[in-house]
């Protein structure tokens, strides 16, 4: 499959250029079965870095305009990417994600729904929580430092603890599950951001 070929041929180049340094619970990158990997989104290369560092074959969704040409449609589908219409509530793309997770696949998504203009994270949309609530697949949050894409930058990312739907259900109180999951994801990602800034700040101070 093209996905495997690309990872083998170009994965080393990505590792050479960005020299990924991972913090946190790195074993969660090997989570088996249906799992949702979420990350903040600031660059078009975010899915590439995720695919190289996560120890699973990861399926992503991307804007449908990339699939308009025959070549684009073939290329992205071969790379385990499927289209989503970001202008509507695209139930077909949600069903695709649900099917993948039910089959035990790994699914990567950016809850912000689009690339953030600034280094700060945007508010999370509810699509990711909806998918998680339907499948109860664990969510693994990954925060990627904005400095990754600066000239001479190195990829620094931190992997968080799994977010389990059953645990959120048990503590959600009067909130709806989708809202509670969305809030939990945003809270955990903000905490990861602070932890990574603290870890890299201490490292720079020692140097």
Image: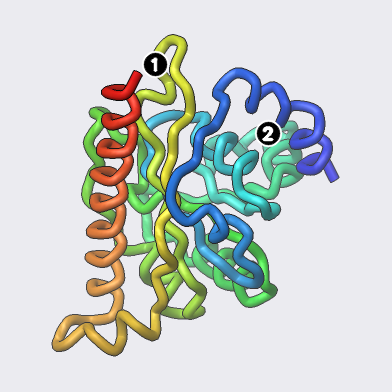
Q: CA distance from mark 2 to mark 1?
A: 28 Å
Q: Quadrant of the C terminus?
A: top left
In the rendered view, does 155 fall on the left or right side of 27? left
Furthest residue to the top? 151
- Residue 170 location (% of width, % of height): 28, 89
Of circles 2 and 1, the one toward us is 1
Quadrant housing residue 121? top left
Quadrant housing residue 9? top right
Q: Which residue is mark 2?
A: 72
N-term mark: 2 or 1: 2
- Residue 107 location (% of width, % of height): 57, 59
Which residue is depicted at the point 14% across and 87% down?
174
**51 or 193, which lies in front?**
193
Q: Determine whether the residue tagged by mark 1 lies in a helix, strand or loop.
A: loop
Q: Quadrant of the N terminus?
A: top right
Give the numbered dot on residue 171. none
In the rendered view, does 149 fall on the left or right side of 183? right
CB-based contact (under 8 Å), mark 2 and mark 1: no
Q: Is residue 2 above or below residue 55?
A: above
Q: Which residue is mark 1?
A: 150
In the rendered view, does 194 fall on the left or right side of 107? left
- Residue 19 location (% of width, % of height): 57, 25
Furthest residue to the front? 206
**128 or 157, which lies in front?**
157
Question: Neighbour class for label 2 at 10 Å: few (<14), some, many (≥20)?
Answer: few
In the rendered view, does 173 fall on the left or right side of 79? left
Which residue is depicted at the point 71% across and 43% down?
79
């Amino acid at each position: 499959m093209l996905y495997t070929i690309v990872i083998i041929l170009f994965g080393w180049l990505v590792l050479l250029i960005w020299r990924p340094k991972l913090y946190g619970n790195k074993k969660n990158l090997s989570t088996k079965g249906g799992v949702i990997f979420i990350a903040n989104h600031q660059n078009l290369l975010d899915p590439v870095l995720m695919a190289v560092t996560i120890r699973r074959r990861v399926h992503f969704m991307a804007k449908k305009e990339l699939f308009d040409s025959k070549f684009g449609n073939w290329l992205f589908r071969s790379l385990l990417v499927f289209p989503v219409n970001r202008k509507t509530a695209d139930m077909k793309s949600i069903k695709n994600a649900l099917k993948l997770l039910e089959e035990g696949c790994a699914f990567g998504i950016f809850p912000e729904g689009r690339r953030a203009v600034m280094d700060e994270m945007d508010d999370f949309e509810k699509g990711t929580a909806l998918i998680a609530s339907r499948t109860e697949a664990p969510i693994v949050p990954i925060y990627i430092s904005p400095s990754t894409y600066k000239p001479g930058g190195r990829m620094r990312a931190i992997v968080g603890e799994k977010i389990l739907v059953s645990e959120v259900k048990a503590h959600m109180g009067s909130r709806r599950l989708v809202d509670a999951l969305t809030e939990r994801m945003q809270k955990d990602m903000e905490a990861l951001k602070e932890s990574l800034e603290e870890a890299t700040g201490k490292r720079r101070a020692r140097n």
